[in-house]
Amino acid sequence: MTVLVAYDGSEPAQKAVKRAFDEYSDEEIVLLRVVEFADGYTGASIKAIQDLLGERRETAAAELREDLSELVDTTDVDFRMEVAAGNPAREVVSYAQEHDIDHIIVGSHGRKGVSRVLLGSVAEQIVRRAPVSVTVVR
């Protein structure tokens, strides 16, 4: 079984990582960090975007490694870290579809009402679109 954990550095995402390592330590765990790009980059040259993407991926991977060492004991847990670029919900769902993921764990800020409608909910979009079961951690 392979478990995908969506990670953005937030407190809910940290709780999702802890849940994955506590409950699925005998399974393969994939920590996915999605780097978002603002729409303003569309006019930039392709080369500039590729360079920026490379830098952001390296930074995100380094931050993820640092956070992970502070959050959980990684001894004897089979895990890997991946970094993608784009819309977080779309990238998590795409990764799950393309990499034979069996379960997704995602943190949620727990926004309700107008706040959720205005800001959107990555966790909700993942739950609606995911090809597998999703656990939402608050």
Image (cartoon, rainbow, N blue to C red):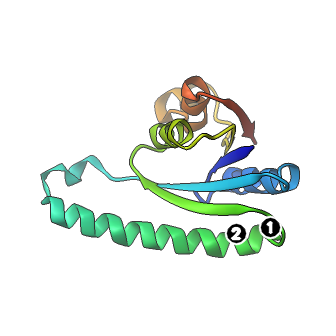
Which x, y percent locates residue 61? 52, 69
**Depth check: 96 or 42 in front?**
96
Q: Is residue 55 left or right of residue 49?
A: right
Label 2 Cα neighbours within 10 Å, binned few <14 / some 14-19 / many ≥20 = some
Which secondary structure lies at badge 2? Answer: helix
- Residue shown at 45% from the left, 54% from the top: 84
Which x, y percent locates residue 45? 12, 60
- Residue shown at 74% from the left, 36% from the top: 135
Quarter of image, res 111: top right
Q: How many marks are shown on the rendered structure?
A: 2
Give yes or no for contact between labels 1 and 2 (Cβ–Cβ under 8 Å). Answer: yes
Which secondary structure lies at badge 1? Answer: loop
Q: Amino acid at mark 2?
A: Leu
Q: What quarter of the picture does the N terminus occupy? A: top right
Quarter of image, res 80: bottom right
Which x, y percent locates residue 122? 54, 37
Residue matched to label 1: 72
Q: Which mark is residue 40?
A: none
Q: Amino acid at mark 1?
A: Val
Q: What quarter of the picture does the C terminus occupy? A: top right
- Residue shown at 59% from the left, 30% from the top: 124
Q: Is residue 54 left or right of residue 137?
A: left
- Residue shown at 58% from the left, 23% from the top: 128
Q: Looking at the picture, does residue 117 appear above or below residue 98?
A: above
Which x, y percent locates residue 46? 16, 59
Report the Cα–Cα distance between label 1 and label 2. Answer: 6 Å
**Depth check: 116 or 28 in front?**
28
Q: Which mark is residue 68?
A: 2
Q: Is residue 21 left or right of residue 58?
A: right
